[in-house]
């Protein structure tokens, strides 16, 4: 029997992941609350949490600091849908992060889309590095729709996206394009903007 594939090892990995996520969530909640504008970074508690775990925490918190128009939801209790384009390791971490959580009384749901044309009923859409070829199609197809477009692809915020993850010395920074968000009828909280690089620059 492969020891590394044993049920005990698998359960241990799940426990470790949840501990990492819990630690990162606490760190990010404190970071946002204190408005650490001086550094503009989320200290990954710092370097021990994996990149995808931190991105999952950010995606969850974006739902708290972004306002969607009422017609972005089918009903008053429709869930907030966080979509992931393609395969990305952020998904299992995100499922752990949102478990049991609600934002403004709405449940959170994670959905995976294989192609930009499949995106339906989505409020946040994340594109990983591997979706660089699909990014222009996604941006063009979803332009004007109330969907927060988030990616780790370099230059994403300048090319039609709304929030871009940037890595600096193993820390995640945010670049936010407020004009692109406004064009989609989304309002990003000033609390989030204070800890981000904001585009367009004055």
Image (cartoon, helix red, strand yellow):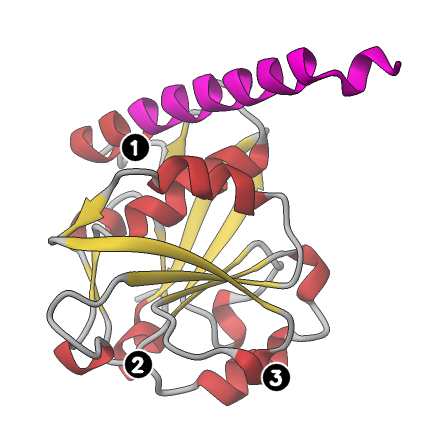
Q: Look at the image and tell me in which quarter the C terminus lies.
A: bottom left
Q: Which mark is residue 132?
A: none
Q: Residue at x 20, y 70 (%)?
A: 68
- Mark 2, secondary structure of its residue: loop
**Mark closer to the chain start, 1 or 2:** 1
Q: Residues within 10 Å of mark 3 (few under 14, many from 20)?
A: some
Instruction: Report the front residue among 180 and 108.
Output: 108
Looking at the image, residue 68 sits to the left or right of residue 95; the answer is left
Measured as percent of width and height from the top left, residue 17 is found at 53, 23
**Stretch in magenta:** 1-27
Q: Which label belongs to residue 38?
A: 1
Q: Residue 184 got which mark? A: 2
Q: Badge 3 is on which residue?
A: 137
Image height check: is 115 above or below 24?
below
Q: How would you rate the neighbour count of disc 1 (Cα within 10 Å): few for under 14, some for 14-19, many for 20 or more?
A: few
Q: Secondary structure at mark 1?
A: loop
| Residue positioned 18% across, 82% down in the render | 71
Q: CA distance from mark 2 to mark 3?
A: 16 Å
Q: Secondary structure at mark 3?
A: helix
- Which label lies toward us, 1 or 2? 2
- Horizontal side of residue 38 vs 104, given as left or right: right
19 or 11: nearer the viewer: 11
Nearer mark to the viewer, of 3 and 1: 3
Side (left or right) of 106 relative to 176: left
Q: Is residue 29 above or below residue 65?
A: above
């Amino acid at each position: 029997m492969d020891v590394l594939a044993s049920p005990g090892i698998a359960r241990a990995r799940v426990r470790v992941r949840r501990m990492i996520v819990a630690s990162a969530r606490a760190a990010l909640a404190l970071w946002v609350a204190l408005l650490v504008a001086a550094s503009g970074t989320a200290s990954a508690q710092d370097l021990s949490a994996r990149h995808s775990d931190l991105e999952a925490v950010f995606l969850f918190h974006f739902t708290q600091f972004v306002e969607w128009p009422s017609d972005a939801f089918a009903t008053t209790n429709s869930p907030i849908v966080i979509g992931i384009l393609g395969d990305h390791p952020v998904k299992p971490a995100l499922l752990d992060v949102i478990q049991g959580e609600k934002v403004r009384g709405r449940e959170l749901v994670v959905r995976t889309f294989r192609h930009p044309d499949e995106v339906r009923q989505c409020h946040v859409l994340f594109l990983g590095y591997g979706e660089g070829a699909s990014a222009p199609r996604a941006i063009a197809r979803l332009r004007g729709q109330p969907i927060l477009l988030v990616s780790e692809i370099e230059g994403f915020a300048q090319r039609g996206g709304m929030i871009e993850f940037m890595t600096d010395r193993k820390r995640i920074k945010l670049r936010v394009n407020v004009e692109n968000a406004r064009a989609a009828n989304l309002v990003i909280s000033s609390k989030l903007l204070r800890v981000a690089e904001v585009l367009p620059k004055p």
